[in-house]
Image: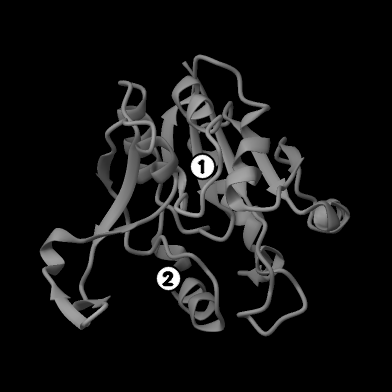
Amino acid sequence: MKRAVVIVAGGSGTRMNSEIPKQFLLLKGMPILMHTVTRFHRFDSNMQLIIVLPKSEADRWERLCDEFHFSIAHQVVEGGSTRFHSVKNGLALVDGNTIVGIHDGVRPLIASNVIERCFAEAANGQSVVPTIPSVDSLRMVTNDGNIALDRSLIRLVQTPQVFPSSLLKSAYEQEYTPTFTDDASVVEAMGYPITLAEGNVENIKITNPLDLAIAERVFESVI
Protein backbone atom coordinates (compact mmCIF):
# COMPACT_ATOMS: atom_id res chain seq x y z
CA MET A 1 0.00 0.00 0.00
CA LYS A 2 1.24 3.48 -0.85
CA ARG A 3 2.29 5.94 1.82
CA ALA A 4 2.02 9.72 1.85
CA VAL A 5 2.53 12.52 4.34
CA VAL A 6 1.05 16.00 4.27
CA ILE A 7 3.39 18.35 6.12
CA VAL A 8 1.57 21.46 7.24
CA ALA A 9 3.91 24.46 7.45
CA GLY A 10 1.77 27.55 7.79
CA GLY A 11 3.32 29.07 10.90
CA SER A 12 4.67 32.55 11.47
CA GLY A 13 7.61 33.83 13.49
CA THR A 14 5.54 35.79 16.02
CA ARG A 15 6.29 33.71 19.11
CA MET A 16 9.90 33.39 17.95
CA ASN A 17 10.21 37.18 17.84
CA SER A 18 11.38 36.70 14.28
CA GLU A 19 10.36 38.11 10.93
CA ILE A 20 11.19 34.71 9.43
CA PRO A 21 8.42 32.09 9.70
CA LYS A 22 9.46 29.46 12.24
CA GLN A 23 9.52 26.59 9.71
CA PHE A 24 12.38 28.37 7.91
CA LEU A 25 14.53 29.11 10.96
CA LEU A 26 17.81 27.24 11.04
CA LEU A 27 18.31 24.10 13.11
CA LYS A 28 21.76 22.57 12.90
CA GLY A 29 22.50 24.85 9.95
CA MET A 30 19.42 23.92 7.87
CA PRO A 31 15.80 25.16 7.85
CA ILE A 32 13.57 23.26 10.28
CA LEU A 33 11.15 22.26 7.53
CA MET A 34 13.91 20.54 5.56
CA HIS A 35 14.78 18.40 8.58
CA THR A 36 11.11 17.44 8.91
CA VAL A 37 10.83 16.40 5.27
CA THR A 38 14.10 14.47 5.53
CA ARG A 39 12.81 12.41 8.49
CA PHE A 40 9.99 10.97 6.39
CA HIS A 41 12.13 10.51 3.28
CA ARG A 42 14.67 8.51 5.28
CA PHE A 43 11.89 6.32 6.66
CA ASP A 44 10.49 5.60 3.18
CA SER A 45 12.19 7.05 0.12
CA ASN A 46 9.09 6.20 -1.95
CA MET A 47 6.69 8.08 0.29
CA GLN A 48 4.71 10.88 -1.37
CA LEU A 49 5.78 14.12 0.33
CA ILE A 50 3.37 17.06 0.24
CA ILE A 51 4.20 20.40 1.85
CA VAL A 52 1.43 22.90 2.54
CA LEU A 53 2.69 26.49 2.63
CA PRO A 54 1.09 29.93 2.68
CA LYS A 55 0.95 31.31 -0.84
CA SER A 56 3.20 34.18 0.25
CA GLU A 57 5.98 31.77 1.31
CA ALA A 58 6.20 29.52 -1.75
CA ASP A 59 8.90 31.61 -3.41
CA ARG A 60 10.94 31.77 -0.21
CA TRP A 61 10.83 27.97 0.07
CA GLU A 62 11.95 27.60 -3.52
CA ARG A 63 14.89 29.94 -2.90
CA LEU A 64 15.85 28.03 0.24
CA CYS A 65 15.77 24.73 -1.63
CA ASP A 66 18.21 26.22 -4.15
CA GLU A 67 20.40 27.75 -1.45
CA PHE A 68 20.66 24.55 0.59
CA HIS A 69 20.75 22.22 -2.44
CA PHE A 70 17.68 20.44 -1.07
CA SER A 71 16.86 17.81 -3.68
CA ILE A 72 14.31 15.51 -1.99
CA ALA A 73 11.35 15.32 -4.36
CA HIS A 74 8.16 16.83 -2.97
CA GLN A 75 5.00 18.69 -3.94
CA VAL A 76 3.97 22.10 -2.66
CA VAL A 77 0.35 23.08 -2.09
CA GLU A 78 -1.11 26.44 -1.12
CA GLY A 79 -2.51 26.59 2.41
CA GLY A 80 -6.00 27.65 3.39
CA SER A 81 -7.51 30.04 5.91
CA THR A 82 -7.26 27.49 8.75
CA ARG A 83 -5.27 24.33 9.44
CA PHE A 84 -8.38 22.34 8.48
CA HIS A 85 -8.50 23.92 5.04
CA SER A 86 -4.73 23.58 4.60
CA VAL A 87 -4.87 19.86 5.31
CA LYS A 88 -7.82 19.48 2.96
CA ASN A 89 -5.82 21.17 0.19
CA GLY A 90 -2.94 18.78 0.76
CA LEU A 91 -5.20 15.73 0.79
CA ALA A 92 -6.42 16.64 -2.69
CA LEU A 93 -3.10 15.29 -4.03
CA VAL A 94 -3.37 11.97 -2.19
CA ASP A 95 -4.78 8.97 -4.05
CA GLY A 96 -7.13 6.38 -2.64
CA ASN A 97 -5.66 3.15 -1.22
CA THR A 98 -2.95 5.17 0.50
CA ILE A 99 -1.94 5.42 4.13
CA VAL A 100 -1.54 9.12 4.82
CA GLY A 101 0.01 10.97 7.73
CA ILE A 102 -0.55 14.60 8.65
CA HIS A 103 2.47 16.18 10.33
CA ASP A 104 3.43 19.57 11.71
CA GLY A 105 6.23 21.17 9.71
CA VAL A 106 7.92 22.33 12.90
CA ARG A 107 8.19 18.86 14.47
CA PRO A 108 11.57 17.81 13.03
CA LEU A 109 12.41 15.41 15.87
CA ILE A 110 9.92 12.66 15.09
CA ALA A 111 11.62 9.29 15.65
CA SER A 112 11.65 6.75 12.83
CA ASN A 113 10.18 4.01 15.05
CA VAL A 114 7.20 6.27 15.83
CA ILE A 115 6.60 6.88 12.12
CA GLU A 116 6.82 3.14 11.51
CA ARG A 117 4.44 2.33 14.38
CA CYS A 118 1.80 4.83 13.29
CA PHE A 119 1.84 3.84 9.62
CA ALA A 120 1.78 0.11 10.47
CA GLU A 121 -1.27 0.45 12.70
CA ALA A 122 -3.06 2.67 10.19
CA ALA A 123 -2.44 0.05 7.51
CA ASN A 124 -4.76 -2.18 9.58
CA GLY A 125 -7.55 0.36 9.12
CA GLN A 126 -7.05 2.33 12.31
CA SER A 127 -6.89 6.08 12.90
CA VAL A 128 -3.61 6.49 14.77
CA VAL A 129 -2.37 9.35 16.94
CA PRO A 130 1.04 9.32 18.68
CA THR A 131 0.90 10.54 22.27
CA ILE A 132 3.04 10.79 25.38
CA PRO A 133 1.98 10.81 29.06
CA SER A 134 1.78 14.09 30.93
CA VAL A 135 4.51 14.51 33.54
CA ASP A 136 2.97 17.70 34.93
CA SER A 137 0.09 18.11 37.35
CA LEU A 138 -2.98 19.36 35.53
CA ARG A 139 -5.89 21.61 36.43
CA MET A 140 -8.98 22.40 34.37
CA VAL A 141 -10.65 25.80 34.54
CA THR A 142 -14.39 25.59 35.25
CA ASN A 143 -17.21 28.10 35.69
CA ASP A 144 -16.72 27.82 39.44
CA GLY A 145 -12.93 28.05 39.48
CA ASN A 146 -10.72 25.09 38.66
CA ILE A 147 -10.29 21.41 39.47
CA ALA A 148 -7.41 18.95 39.49
CA LEU A 149 -7.28 16.28 36.79
CA ASP A 150 -5.86 12.80 37.08
CA ARG A 151 -2.78 13.05 34.88
CA SER A 152 -2.63 9.26 34.46
CA LEU A 153 -5.71 9.61 32.27
CA ILE A 154 -4.21 12.38 30.11
CA ARG A 155 -2.11 12.01 26.97
CA LEU A 156 -0.33 14.80 25.11
CA VAL A 157 -1.02 14.63 21.40
CA GLN A 158 1.68 14.72 18.71
CA THR A 159 1.92 14.18 14.97
CA PRO A 160 2.05 12.42 12.53
CA GLN A 161 -1.58 11.44 12.84
CA VAL A 162 -2.02 8.62 10.35
CA PHE A 163 -5.14 7.26 8.59
CA PRO A 164 -6.36 5.30 5.61
CA SER A 165 -6.67 8.03 2.98
CA SER A 166 -10.25 7.19 2.01
CA LEU A 167 -11.39 7.61 5.61
CA LEU A 168 -9.53 10.87 6.15
CA LYS A 169 -10.58 12.43 2.86
CA SER A 170 -14.19 11.57 3.66
CA ALA A 171 -13.88 13.15 7.11
CA TYR A 172 -12.54 16.35 5.57
CA GLU A 173 -15.70 16.71 3.51
CA GLN A 174 -17.45 17.81 6.70
CA GLU A 175 -18.31 21.43 7.35
CA TYR A 176 -15.51 23.13 9.30
CA THR A 177 -16.03 23.94 12.98
CA PRO A 178 -13.58 25.55 15.47
CA THR A 179 -13.60 22.31 17.48
CA PHE A 180 -11.46 20.71 14.77
CA THR A 181 -8.07 21.32 16.41
CA ASP A 182 -6.31 18.38 14.76
CA ASP A 183 -7.01 15.55 12.34
CA ALA A 184 -8.15 13.15 15.03
CA SER A 185 -10.91 15.56 16.07
CA VAL A 186 -12.11 15.72 12.46
CA VAL A 187 -12.22 11.93 12.14
CA GLU A 188 -13.78 11.50 15.58
CA ALA A 189 -16.64 13.82 14.58
CA MET A 190 -17.55 11.19 11.95
CA GLY A 191 -17.95 8.60 14.70
CA TYR A 192 -14.67 6.75 14.14
CA PRO A 193 -12.54 5.65 17.12
CA ILE A 194 -8.99 6.89 17.61
CA THR A 195 -6.09 4.56 18.39
CA LEU A 196 -3.32 5.99 20.58
CA ALA A 197 0.26 4.98 19.78
CA GLU A 198 3.42 5.65 21.74
CA GLY A 199 5.17 8.83 20.62
CA ASN A 200 8.64 10.11 21.45
CA VAL A 201 9.17 12.81 24.04
CA GLU A 202 11.65 14.71 21.84
CA ASN A 203 8.97 15.23 19.18
CA ILE A 204 8.23 18.78 20.30
CA LYS A 205 6.52 21.43 18.22
CA ILE A 206 9.04 24.24 17.83
CA THR A 207 7.11 27.42 18.57
CA ASN A 208 9.42 29.58 20.70
CA PRO A 209 13.17 30.20 21.24
CA LEU A 210 13.38 27.70 24.12
CA ASP A 211 11.96 24.95 21.91
CA LEU A 212 14.59 25.71 19.28
CA ALA A 213 17.38 25.60 21.88
CA ILE A 214 16.12 22.23 23.14
CA ALA A 215 15.93 20.88 19.59
CA GLU A 216 19.53 21.91 18.95
CA ARG A 217 20.61 20.08 22.10
CA VAL A 218 18.76 16.80 21.53
CA PHE A 219 18.84 16.63 17.73
CA GLU A 220 21.57 14.02 17.44
CA SER A 221 19.89 11.69 19.94
CA VAL A 222 16.75 11.18 17.85
CA ILE A 223 16.96 8.48 15.18
- Residue at image location 32% in from the left, 56% down from the top: 200
Give the residue type at disc 1: Ile
Q: In which quadrant of the rendered view does residue 192 lie?
A: top left
- Circle 2: element type: helix
Residue 59, which numbered label?
none
**N-term-proximal mark, 1 vs 2:** 1
Residue 218, which numbered label?
2
- Circle 1: element type: strand
86 displayed left or right of 195: right
- Residue at image location 14% in from the left, 59% down from the top: 153
Residue 178 visible in this rendered orientation of the protein = yes
- Residue at image location 57% in from the left, 31% down from the top: 45
Q: Position of residue 171 (x, y in %)?
A: 48, 30
Residue 41 visible in this rendered orientation of the protein = no
Q: Which residue is mark 1?
A: 102
135 displayed left or right of 51: left
The number of numbered discs placed on residues in the rendered structure image is 2
Residue 107 vs 135, above or below: the answer is: above
Task: Please state which of residues 201 and 53 is positioned toward the viewer in this rendering.
Answer: 53
Return the residue found at the far front.
143
